Amino acid sequence: MPDFRTEHDLLGELHVPADALYGIHTARALANFRLSGRAVSPGLIRALALVKKACALANRELGFLSAGKSDAICSACDEVAAGQHAGQFRLDAVQGGAGTSTNMNLNEVIANRALELLGAARGDYAKLHPIEDVNLHQSTNDVYPTALKVAAISGLRELSAALATLQGAFQKKEKEFSGIVKLGRTEMQDAVPLTMGAEFSAFAEAFARDRWRTFKAEERLRVVNLGGTAIGTGLTAPRSYIFLVIERLREVTGLGLTRAENLVDATANADCFAEVAGMLNACAANFIKVARDLRLLHMLGEIRLPAVQAGSSIMPGKVNPVIAEAALQAGMQARAAGALVTEAAAAGTLQINECLPLLAAALLDQIALLRNAAAMLAPHVEGLTADAETCRHYLDYSPALITAFLPRIGYEQAQAWLKEYKAGGQTDLRAFLTSKLGREIVEQTLAPENLMALGFRSESVKAV
């Protein structure tokens, strides 16, 4: 039995491995594109299979595909969507042709698997053809961006779930730490007191906004151009198919998708992806900021991050905050991916965007990085602890503590007392203020419920 079969295309003939489900178009692309060393995202492959299935269902319902061909194509699509035949999708994620090579990879694998299901040989395209049957009434230019939106929506939903877990982890710490009074800091300097619970509430709220943004990002992706074929005019596709295929796509994906009113616009412009990347950049910024804050609080000893691995090959006993550092780097890489999405979205020419493969790889990377960072950080946050004594030490020995007493003693009196405090060589400002105001007033002023009461009641403060 020969170890290859011969296929042909516009450029001539080519040997294809006999056991390959892909065909000549994929083989040429495998030889042409060796750039990133990374294959097309499995999420995009899955989404493309779902789009192909929706197209086959619409074509069957309208009589353009026989029941036998449609059933075989749909079964092959189901297998691909389930992750089967993954080894047949080895194309480099970065490729020329606006995604045509990836589209043809799907067409060929689905066609050859459908042929097997029909009892025919791989490559027997006279019985079922990758383009004339699997790609019927389609173009890369409507299938690929539609599939990218389906894949991105799926990814955003996973990201939203991961962010919800992370938000919940911070909210648990917010409650757990609500009674710990500590020093706030601005510009890396001592500032006024607050509770650690309030500090962690800010982390929780940041990721709560990111959850909201993922929902808004999904909205931006629900309008697709399937049915527009090459440039959005629907040329070569029956009008009945153009209206029906979106309904079948909604059924196959379970997503609330809708056909764009202006298919030429939806085919030519990729700004919706840039908008989504911008929303995700805000999430990346939060990961960077929060991870840095956790690292700093850990260094100060106010919190203790869980030890997960030894920290040095030369310093025994050293343990580093590696999870926070990894989350920080994930945020940085996600922002870089977002910049690539924007650059690629701007690089389209007239009726299509030739850079969609790069855009797709960057956008799906951005989503995956943030999802994985959230999944990694959430259990780490759940395991961190607070050191109330260290927090109190920093607070009691900081001149900034006196700010809490300004409504009672005034700014000038506070300055005079600070001079006296420093001149006396004292270090414990709480003790000094207790000697001036009495323990009851000091403890009442620094009680968590008073510090977080959003201002003071004038009747409760009597001037000294």
Image: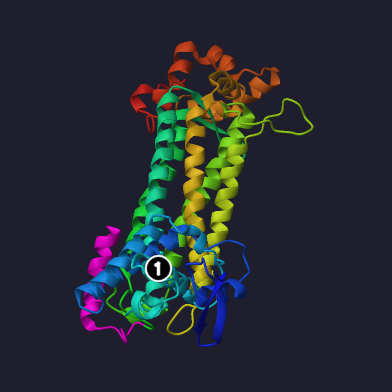
On-image quarter of the N terminus: bottom right
Q: Quadrant of residue 427?
A: top right
Nearest the eye: 421 or 220: 220
Image position, residue 166 (x, y; %)? 44, 39
Q: Secondary structure at mark 1?
A: helix
The three-letter code of the residue at mark 1 reads: Ile
Nearest the eye: 248 or 60: 60
Q: Is residue 337 above or below residue 225?
A: above
Q: Quadrant of residue 179?
A: top left
Q: Is residue 366 above or below residue 383?
A: below
- Can residue 7 be seen in the rendering of this structure? yes
Q: Is residue 246 above or below residue 330?
A: below
- Can residue 149 be seen in the rendering of this structure? no
**Neighbourhood count class around disc 1 (C-alpha, 10 Å): few under 14, some 14–19, many 20 upward:** many
Image position, residue 403 (x, y; %)? 52, 29
Q: Is residue 244 magenta?
A: yes
Q: Is residue 242 magenta?
A: yes
Image position, residue 453 (x, y; %)? 37, 29
Q: Quadrant of residue 391?
A: top right
- Residue at numbered disc 1: 110
The region drawn magenta spans 232-259
